Structures are given as structure tokens and as C-alpha cells.
Amino acid sequence: MRAFILCMVVFAICPAFGQQPQEIANSIGMKLVLIPADAFTMGSPEEDVGRHPNERQHKVTISEPYYLGQFEVTQEEYEKVTGSNPSSIKGARHPVETLGWEDAVSFCKKLSELPEEKAAGREYRLPTEAEWEYACRAGSETPYSFGESAKPLHEHAWFAENSQNQHHPAGGKKPNRWDLYDMHGNVYEWCDDWFDDYPSRSVIDPQGPIRGTERVIRGGSWVVANESHFRSAQLSNYKPKDRSPLLGFRVVLDAPSHRP
């Protein structure tokens, strides 16, 4: 019996026995949180205030766990990897911004090529739109990850009402239930998908359309005053070559690629 109990304890605490760590820090100090596989309802009901016409509700299955950056990529992290900082508003712990979709993708590739990351078998990428919304919701089905009402928004997001006309250091507001910061507000975040209508059927691990003219951005930003733009399902889009101090990103690491 003692041996059985000991084995169960070791299995519960040791990633080598099959359990992925709930949080990891990579070679540049970037923290990533494990997001569990599950199904959820993506999009918003028609009665949601400020709803985008394209936010058709549909069931999405996320079939594999993945790691998502706990914070938006910061300027110091971006500079460690690329040697440059394109941001209009400087601050080491502020989100990097004024970069296009291609710049965000290039960062992911360069981060993956760092010797320590390559040795660990880690390959980084942008989140799909479905992965982003799923992580933002953190198990919630309400308009905001923190509930039905936007009244507590100032506790969770930097937006026009409280931002003093600039973005702020990562992690300055309350996280969602999965310990992710700034999923609402601070800067918009690039997603991997082209912008288009949602499917009406249930889907598994959707990747978005194969072509388009604009990429999906999510999360709202520090200049936005309309509270409905910070809903978990809020759908926005931008041309991939456009750069703005409102636009940043966070990264995904597929969990099976992590070697403890």
C-alpha cells in the first residue's frame, strides 16, 4: 500500500511521469501557462451589447493542451531576441508594439531558433483565434472573463478610462482564472488567422481561412473607450503589414514540444 501511495504522489508531482508543468519559464525569462484541452462555445449570443455580426456562436474543440504567454510579449523580451525595439512608447516591461503581423511571426521563429529553445525542442507561434478566445474565457461563458457586467473592467484592463493615454507594464491588472494577464486591454494582440465569417458547424482545432486580406486581432487596447470592445468574443481585424502603438502579441508553445 505504501508503495502504491508513493507511486501516485510521484506521478502527481513529476512531469517526467506524464504530467506537464502548469507554468514554464523559457531561456529569456518569458513565462507561459498551460492551457488544458477542452471544448467551448466560441462567439457571442445575439443579445450581447456591441456584438460584431461575425461572432456566430459555434462549438470548438481544442484537442491538445498548449502553453500561452502569461503576459503580452514585452519590449525587453523582444529586444533580447531581435536586437531591436520598434515600440512608440518605450518601457522594458511594457508590451512591444508598432509591429506588423509578419514581425510577430518572425519573432516566434527567432525565439524558436535560440540555442536553448532549440535544444529543448520548443517551437513558438502565434495563437489561433480559437486558442486566444478559449484562453481569454478561462472556462467562462459570460461576455467578460470576469462576469456578465463590464463594471469591474477597470480592475482587469487598461483602457481609455484609466490608461492615461498610454499602455502599461505587463501584469498591472488582475489576471483571469487561468492566471493570464492583460487578455482584456493594454494592447490588441495579433492572432494567426485571416479574418472571415465563422463556420456554423462544430469544429476541431480551427485554423481559420487559408487566405484573406486582414488578420484577426483580439483583446482591445488602451485607447478604446467602448466597454463592449473588451468582451472575450470581440472580433477585430487589421491589415497584416499595418503597424500601430495599439498592436502587440503573445506567443503559444505547443505542450508536446516541451521537454522538462
Image: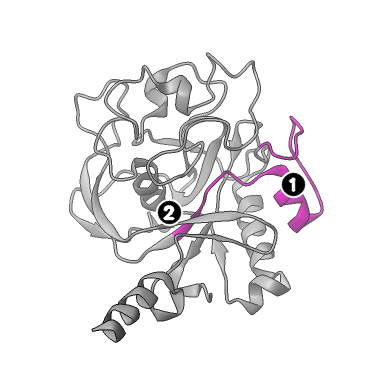
Residue closer to the observer: 53 or 46:
46
- Look at label 1 and name its amino acid: Glu
- Look at label 2 and name its amino acid: Thr
Residue closer to the observer: 116 or 3:
3
Colour basis: one colour
The residues colored magenta run 67-94
Q: Which residue reaches farthest right?
A: 83
Between the C-alphas of marks 2 and 1, the distance is 24 Å
In the displayed structure image, the side of residue 18 where residue 100 appears, left or right: right
Residue at image x 59%, y 48%? 101
In the displayed structure image, the side of residue 178 where residue 41 appears, left or right: left
Q: Is residue 10 magenta?
A: no
Residue at image x 41%, y 28%? 230
Lower position in the chain sequence, tag 2 or tag 1: 1
Q: How many marks?
A: 2
Q: Which mark is residue 76?
A: 1
- Our reading of the magenta stretch's main secondary structure is loop
- Image coordinates of residue 188 in percent, x first then y, are 53, 35
Q: Residues within 10 Å of mark 2 (few under 14, many from 20)?
A: many
Q: Which mark is residue 128?
A: 2
Residue at image x 40%, y 47%? 178
- The reply to whether the C-beta atoms of the residues labelled 2 and 1 are less than 8 Å apart is no
Instruction: Answer with the quarter of the image where residue 204 lies.
Output: bottom left
Q: Is residue 78 magenta?
A: yes
- Image coordinates of residue 249 in percent, x first then y, are 57, 45
- Image coordinates of residue 122 in percent, x first then y, are 57, 71
Q: Is residue 131 above or below residue 115?
A: above
In what element is the residue under mark 2?
loop
